[in-house]
Image (cartoon, helix red, strand yellow):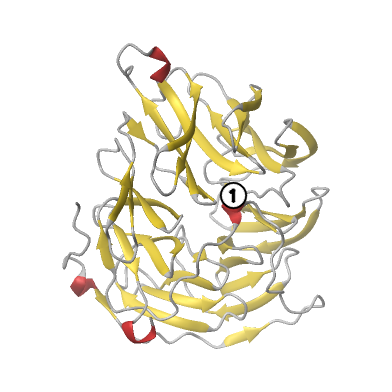
C-alpha cells in the first residue's frame, strides 16, 4: 500500500496569520446573494465542505489527484495504467481499477460514481473490441465499470485528443484524432444518443452547465489560432441547437455556468481578460466585467483583476470585493459553495499563502502561509485536496485537531 504520510514537505508549511486588506461592501439593486442554489446536475453540485481552520502541515498522498467525490480522492499513478482511490481521512486505499494501457488525467464525479476515460493500445487476448478509446462510468465504492463505451477504434496519441464531461443526463465526448466529432452517451447506460462530425467540439476546460437538466453548451471553433468561434446551446439528448452566439477574436476562452446564466471568460492578446455574462435562455449579453474567472460555484463567480478579487452573481452584480488581494496569472482557485480557497501573493517573493474567504461575504476565515504552487482540486468529507508541485502527489489539508 502506498505510503500516505511523508515528512518531505513538513518544513515547507508554517501556520501564520496573513493580513488581508479591508473588505469593500458592494450594494446592488438585487439584494444579497441567496444561499439556496438552483437545480444542477449531480456533477455540478458542490461536495462536502472543506475545513475552515487549517492544520499547519498538509498530509501527502501518493499519486496525482484527478478528482474528488464518493468520499474518496481519485488518483492517477505515474504509470497511468490504473486509477487508485484513497480515503482522505486515513490514507487507506479503497480500491484500484483494472489495468489499461493508459488512463486520462481527467475524471468527473457523478453522484457516488466517476466518469473516466482510458485507451488500450493492444487487444485483451484476441478481442479486438478492447482496442481504442473508451469512456466509462466506475462505481465509486469498488472502481468496477458500471458501463464502458468505445468512442474510437483508434487509440488517441495525445492526452488532448479526447475530452469528456457529464451534462444533463448524458456524457458529452469530443475527439479530434482523425477528424473532429462530438457524441453524447447516456449517463445511465453508456449508449450513444447522437453524434456530430461537423467540427463541433467540447473542450476539457469548459465548465458550462445544463440549466436544470435540460440543456448543455458546446463551442464550435473556426480559427484555432485566434480562438474565434460560435457558442451554442443545445439539447444534449437530440443534439439540436437552440441558439448560437458568434464570439470575436480572443486568445483563450473558458465557459462557466451560474444558475441560468453563462459566464464567458476570455483573454486578449495582451493578456488582459474580460468576463461576459450571458442570459442562458437567449444568449444575450447581460454585463461585462474586466478580469479573469478564478473560481465559481452555484451562486457566484470569483474574478481577479489588477484591483483585487471580487465575487459576482449570475447577472454580473458585484457581491463583495477584497481590494489589493494578488493572484498570479494562470493560478486557479476553488469554491465549494461555502468557502473560496485561493493562493495569494507572488511566487517570486516567496510569499504564497493559502487563504479561505467566506463565499457569501468575502471575509477571511482561514489562512496558511507556505511556499508551494499547489493546484487546488476540491473538497471531500471535510478535507481540502490539492496537487503538490513536487512529483504530482496529492496534498490533504485537514482542519486543526482542536477544531475538527
112 w.r.t. 147: above or below: below
Q: Quadrant of residue 97?
A: top left
Q: Residue at x 54, y 53 (%)?
A: 270
Against 372, residue 234 (above or below) is above
Q: Quadrant of the C terminus?
A: bottom left
- Quick one: 68 or 365, which is closer to the camera? 68
Q: Is residue 388 visible in this depiction of the protein?
A: no
Q: Quadrant of residue 361?
A: bottom right
Residue at the limit of the structure toward the left, as seen here: 7
Counting from the top left corner in percent of width and height, residue 139 is at: 45, 44
Could you say where residue 351 lies in the image, as x and y percent from the top left? 33, 75
Q: Position of residue 175 (x, y in %)?
A: 53, 28
Residue nearest the observer in this picture, 366 or 277: 366
Q: Position of residue 222 (x, y in %)?
A: 64, 31
SS at badge 1: loop
Callout count: 1
**Residue 313 visible:** yes
191 or 178, nearer to the observer? 191
Rendered view: 163 above or below 62 = above
- Tell me which residue sits at (62%, 77%) in the image: 360
Residue identified by numbered label 1: 207
Q: Counting other residues with Cα less than 10 Å from the Cα at mark 1, is it few (<14), some (14-19), or many (20 or more)? A: many
Amino acid at each position: 500500500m502506498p505510503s500516505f504520510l511523508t515528512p518531505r514537505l513538513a518544513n515547507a508549511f508554517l501556520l501564520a496569520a496573513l493580513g488581508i486588506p479591508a473588505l469593500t461592501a458592494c450594494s446592488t439593486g438585487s439584494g444579497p446573494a441567496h444561499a439556496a442554489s438552483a437545480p444542477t446536475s449531480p456533477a455540478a453540485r458542490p461536495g462536502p465542505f472543506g475545513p475552515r481552520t487549517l492544520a499547519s502541515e498538509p498530509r501527502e498522498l501518493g499519486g496525482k489527484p484527478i478528482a474528488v467525490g464518493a468520499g474518496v480522492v481519485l488518483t492517477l499513478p505515474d504509470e497511468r495504467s490504473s486509477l487508485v482511490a484513497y480515503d482522505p481521512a486515513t490514507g487507506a486505499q479503497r480500491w484500484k481499477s483494472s489495468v489499461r494501457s493508459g488512463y486520462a488525467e481527467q475524471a468527473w464525479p457523478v453522484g457516488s460514481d466517476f466518469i473516466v476515460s482510458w485507451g488500450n493500445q493492444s487487444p485483451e487476448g484476441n478481442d479486438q473490441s478492447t482496442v481504442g478509446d473508451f469512456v466509462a462510468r466506475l462505481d465509486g465504492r469498488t472502481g468496477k465499470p458500471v458501463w464502458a463505451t468505445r468512442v474510437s477504434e483508434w487509440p488517441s496519441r495525445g492526452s488532448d485528443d479526447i475530452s469528456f464531461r457529464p451534462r444533463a443526463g448524458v456524457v458529452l465526448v469530443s475527439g479530434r484524432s482523425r477528424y473532429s466529432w462530438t457524441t453524447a452517451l447516456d449517463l445511465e447506460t453508456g449508449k450513444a444518443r447522437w453524434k456530430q462530425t461537423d467540427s463541433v467540439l467540447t473542450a476539457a476546460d469548459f465548465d458550462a452547465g445544463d440549466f436544470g437538466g435540460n440543456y448543455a453548451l458546446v463551442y464550435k471553433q473556426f480559427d484555432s489560432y485566434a480562438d474565434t468561434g460560435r457558442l451554442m446551446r443545445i439539447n444534449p439528448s437530440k443534439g439540436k441547437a437552440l441558439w448560437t452566439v458568434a464570439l470575436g477574436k480572443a486568445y483563450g476562452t473558458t465557459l462557466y455556468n451560474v444558475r441560468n446564466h453563462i459566464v464567458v471568460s476570455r483573454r486578449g492578446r495582451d493578456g488582459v481578460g474580460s468576463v461576459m455574462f450571458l442570459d442562458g435562455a437567449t444568449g444575450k449579453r447581460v454585463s461585462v466585467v474586466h478580469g479573469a474567472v478564478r473560481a465559481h460555484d452555484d451562486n457566484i463567480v470569483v474574478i481577479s483583476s489588477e484591483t483585487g478579487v471580487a465575487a459576482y452573481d449570475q447577472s454580473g452584480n458585484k457581491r463583495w470585493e477584497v481590494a489589493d488581494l494578488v493572484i498570479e496569472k494562470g493560478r486557479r482557485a476553488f469554491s465549494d459553495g461555502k468557502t473560496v480557497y485561493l493562493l495569494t501573493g507572488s511566487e517570486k517573493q516567496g510569499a504564497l499563502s493559502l487563504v479561505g474567504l467566506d463565499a457569501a461575504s468575502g471575509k477571511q476565515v482561514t489562512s496558511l502561509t507556505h511556499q508551494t504552487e499547489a493546484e487546488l482540486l476540491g473538497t471531500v468529507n471535510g478535507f481540502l485536496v490539492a496537487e503538490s508541485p513536487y512529483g504530482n502527489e496529492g496534498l490533504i489539508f485537514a482542519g486543526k485537531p482542536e477544531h475538527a
